[in-house]
Image (cartoon, rainbow, N blue to C red):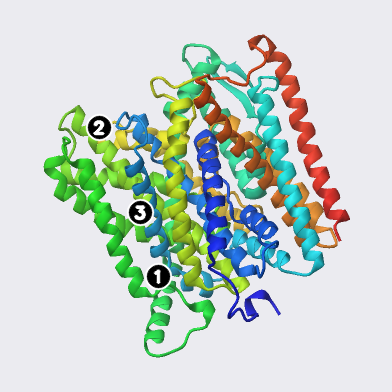
Amino acid sequence: MTEASKPTTGMRELTLRAIVLGGILTLMFTAANVYLGLKVGLTFATSIPAAVISMALLRFMTGSTILENNIVQTIASAAGTLAAIIFVLPGLVMVGYWQGFPLLETTAITMLGGILGVLFSVPLRRALVVDADLPYPEGRAAAEVLQVGAASAEGAAENKAGLSALLWNSLVAAGFTLLTQMKVAAGEVSKWFSVGTGATGVAGGLGFALVGVGHLVGLSVGMAQLVGLITGWWVLLPILTQGGSGDAETLANTVFRSDVRFFGAGVIAVAAIWTLIKIAGPVIGGIRSAMAASKARHAGTVLAVGERDIPIGWVFGGSLLVLVPIAWLLCSILAGGPLAGSAAILVAGALVFVVVIGLMIASVTGYMAGLIGASNSPVSGIGILAIIASSLLLVGLLGRGGGEEASAAMVAYALIVTGVVFGIATISNDNLQDLKTGQLVGATPWKQQVALIIGVFFGSLVVPPVLNVLNETLGFVGVPGAGPNALAAPQAGLISSLAKGVLGGDLNWTMLGYGALAGVGFILVDELLGRAGKLRLPPLAIGIGIYLPMAVILPVVVGAVLGWFYDRWAAGRANPGFAHRMGVLTATGLIVGESLFGVFYAGLVYATDSDAPLAVVGDSFHIPSIFVGLGLFAGLIALSYARTRKAVTTTV
C-alpha cells in the first residue's frame, strides 16, 4: 500500500509547530536564495532540505506525522521560488528609481504577487496534478524523502545519513567560501585572449553552489547550457568583437553585455513562446476538467480528502480582494509623479494585465514544473516576456516621449507591474510541485494551499531587509557607488534594459531578432533529437547558457556531468532510490552552505563597512591563491562525493 492510499483522517497536519518550523526555514532559505540569485542568477529548490530538517527535528516531538513534515516543506518551498522576485526588483535600483528597497512597497509587491500565484494555481491542481500524466520530478523526490522518514528503522537510518550528507556538504561549501573571502583561495579562474582583432576567453567560478545546481538540473540541461556557452562565448563573441579596442577582458565583457546577452534573450523569448504553444491545449482541457469537478461537488458529490481544494468561490473572491491592495499600491506609486495625470488608465490597464497575463503564466509555469521540475523551469524567460509585454502595454496606453522624467517613471512602473506578475509565475511554478508531493503522501490540498500562502507571508518579510543589506554593502554591477564585489543581478539587469529599450524605442532589436531566429533553429534541433530518442537540448537552457557569464555556466556544466556519473553509479546500488536521494542531498548541501555563508558575509561587510573584512593576504598572493583554490576545489568535490558513496554502501 502506498502512502497516497493510506487513510490519513485524524493525522496531525496543519499544526502550529509545523507552521513555526516552516516559517523559520523559509526565512533562512529565502535569505540564502536572494543572495545566490543576485550573485549568479540562479536559485535552489528548498523542499527536500526542508523535509529532511523537519523530519530530523519533529521526530523528537510527540505524535509527529508525515503530513506535518509535508506542511513544513510546503511552507519552506516558497523560499525556493519567491526569492526569484530579485530577478526583477533590483532593476528599480539599477535604473535609479529606488535608492534602496522600501519595506512596504517591496513586501507588498512580493506578497501580493505570491498570494495571487497560489490562488491562480488552485483550479489547475486537478488539471495538471491529478489528470495530467506529468513526471513532477521534484514533487516525487520530496514525497520519497518524506516516506523514508516515516518508514521503519531502515528509513530512520537513511534519514540520518541524508541529514549528515546535507550538513557535511554545507560545511564544506561554507568553509571553502570562507577561504576565498580570506583571499587564500581564488574564487574564480579566467584567461582572456585575442582572436584576430577580437577577443574571448575561458572563465570558471570555483563555486560549490554552482556545482550543486549542475547536479540537480541534470545532464540534458547541463549540455544545453554548454551549447549556449559555446555559441555565446566562442562563436558570437569572437565575431562581434572584431575591430574592437581595449584589452581582451574589457572588450569581451563589454560586447557580451551590450550584444550577446540580447541574443540570448531572443532565444529565451522564442523558446518560452514555443512552450506556450505546446501546452495550450492540455491546460485548457485540464481547466475544463477542474470546473466539472467543482460542479459535481456543488451537486452533492462528496470528494475524498485528497480532492479538497480551497473552494473555487474563495479563490475567485480572494483574487478580487488581492487586486484591491495592488490597485492601492500602484496608485500610491504614481501619486505626485510625472504619470499622476494618467493614473486611472495606467492602474486599470495594469490590473487587467495582471489578471490575464497572470492566469496564462500560472498555467504555463505550472505545466513546466510538471515537465522538468520547479528548479529547471525557465521563469526568468517568462519574466523577459512579461517585461516586454508590460512595456508595450504602456507604449500603447501613453505612447513614447513625454520627457526624460516621464520615461524613467514608465520604466519603473513597468518593472513594478512585472514584479507582481513574476510573483504569480514563481509561486504557481512551485505550488503544483508541492501538491504532487501531497497527493503521493495523502495530504489535504486545501491545507497545503493555505500553508503555501503562509510561506509567501514569511518569505515576503525577509526579502526587503536582505536586499537592503546586500545593496548597501555590495551594491549591483553598473550602479554608481557599487563596491568591487558588486552583485551581477543578471536577470534584473537584462529586464530593466529591456524595459528601457522598449519604452525608449532604442532596444537592441537586431540582436534580439538574430537570437529569435537562432531560437527557432534550437527548437528544431531539440525536436529532432527527441524524435530520434537522443539526449534533448532544451532551447530555454541554451538561451540561458548564452545569456549568463561563462564563469557561472561552466561550473554548472561540470556539476551536471558529475551528477550524471554519480546517478549512473547510484542506479547499480542495492537501493538505487536511496542512493539517488543521497546525491540530491549532497548537491543541496553544497548550495545551502555557500549561499548561507554569502548572506552572513554580506552582513559582516555591512557591520564592518569594509569590502574585504576577512582578507588575510593581499593582491600579491593572487597567483598562489589560484593553485590553492583549484587544488582545494577539486579535492573537496572528490571527497564529498566519495563520502556520499561510502554512506550509501554502509547504510542498512
> In the rendering, at what x and y percent does residue 425 appear?
42, 54
Tell me what residue is drawn at x 16 percent, y 29 percent.
Answer: 403
Of the image marks 3 and 1, the number of the one nearer the N terminus: 3
- Residue 363 appears at what percent x and percent y? 42, 62
Q: Is residue 69 left or right of residue 283?
A: right
* Mark 3 and mark 2 residues within 8 Å of each other at the beta carbon: no
Residue lying farthest to the top in this orientation: 620
Asked which quadrant contains residue 464, the reply is: top left
Seen in the image, is 403 located left or right of residue 408? left
Q: Which residue is mark 2?
A: 408
Q: Secondary structure at mark 1?
A: helix
Q: Amino acid at mark 2?
A: Ala
Decide: marks 3, 1 in contact (CB < 8 A)?
Answer: no
Q: Which residue is label 1 attached to? A: 284
Of circles 1 and 2, the one toward us is: 2
Mark 2 surroundings within 10 Å by alpha-carbon count, few (fewer than 14), some (14 through 19), many (20 or more)? some
Q: CA distance from mark 3 to mark 2?
A: 24 Å
Eye-nearest disc, 3 or 2: 3
Mark earlier in primary sequence (3, 2): 3
- In the rendered image, the vertical position of residue 283 relative to residue 201, given as above or below: below
Residue 331, given in percent of the width and then of the height, sits at 20, 47
Which residue is the site of mark 3?
112
163 or 625: nearer the viewer: 163
Q: Position of residue 364 (x, y in %)?
A: 44, 59
Instruction: Name which quarter of the figure residue 258 lies in.
Output: top left
**Quarter of the image where the C terminus is located:** bottom right
- In this orientation, does residue 507 appear? yes
The relative height of residue 355 versus residue 132 in the rendered view (above or below) is: above
Instruction: Report the side of 572 relative to 139 (left or right).
Output: right
Please tell me which residue lies in front, 67 or 525.
67
